[in-house]
Amino acid sequence: MKLIVATPKSGSTYFTRWHWYQDTELNYLAEYFQPEHFPDNSNTDSVINSRLAEDHSNSVIKIHTGKETPKRVWDWVADHPVHIVKRQDTWAQTLGLGLSYLSDNWTLYPNEHTTYYSGFYLKEWFDDLVWRIDDLQQRQHSLNVASTVYYEDIYKYTVTDKTARMPVKQHTKSIQQLEKHFYNISEVKEWHNDWIRRKAVS
């Protein structure tokens, strides 16, 4: 089993699919334990319990840290080697998250085009991202970490299969250009700077 643990906008979809293309005999289950991807009107607890009971030894699975993932899933994760995906540039990650919320488009593939929208960056988006990043930082110490991969190095993981459908970089504009899509960018910078300062003294 290949088990990837990450935060949003960190390159985790690319890395998950890269693992799958190394052995396409594996079951590509992606975000199998993320409730937002469960069938409509399903009972979350029942789905999770059922999926935890399955044999995943021949699967590729990705899990994002987040309050939606219950403890029993993390207990299961702790029993297996995991590959952690992080992003060193958290400001770029913050901007990418906001742009994906505005467009409701989270992954880009070849021959697709990014549509940029402008709007206000909601505090709840930022707070949720910070919670997920901080949670991964703390949680990784209790996990069996097989490897840690950074978004900034993801280009090193290449796929030789020319027919492979791999994600491409979604937001290719410069940081300065991306910032212009948020009407309250000064406020967002304050949120981010405050968070970085708190991390530095903790």
Image: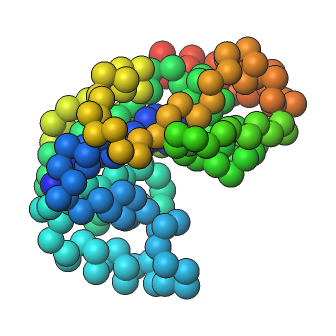
Residue 71 in the figure: left or right of residue 144: right
Q: Residue at x 62, y 24 (%)?
A: 172
Q: Quadrant of the N terminus?
A: bottom left
Q: Is residue 80 above or below residue 168?
A: below
Residue 111 in the figure: left or right of residue 60: right
Q: Residue at x 52, y 43 (%)?
A: 109
Callout count: 0
Of residues 50 and 157, the one drawn nearer to the viewer in this rendering: 157
The percent position of residue 33, horizontal first and vertical second, equals: 37, 64
Q: Residue at x 61, y 43 (%)?
A: 112
The percent position of residue 128, horizontal first and vertical second, equals: 58, 45
The percent position of residue 180, horizontal first and vertical second, equals: 81, 23
Residue 35 in the figure: left or right of residue 71: right
Residue 24 in the figure: left or right of residue 180: left
- Coloration of the structure image: rainbow
Question: Which of the 4 quarters of the picture holds residue 55?
Answer: bottom left
Question: Which of the 4 quarters of the picture holds residue 150?
Answer: top left
Q: Residue at x 46, y 40 (%)?
A: 167
Q: Quadrant of the C terminus?
A: top left
* Residue positioned most to the front: 162
Q: Is residue 138 above or below residue 91?
A: below
Residue 78 appears anywhere in the view? no
Residue 28 appears anywhere in the view? yes
Q: Is residue 22 above or below residue 74?
A: above
Q: Is residue 166 above or below residue 157?
A: below
The percent position of residue 117, horizontal first and vertical second, equals: 80, 39
Of residues 9 and 16, the one drawn nearer to the viewer in this rendering: 16
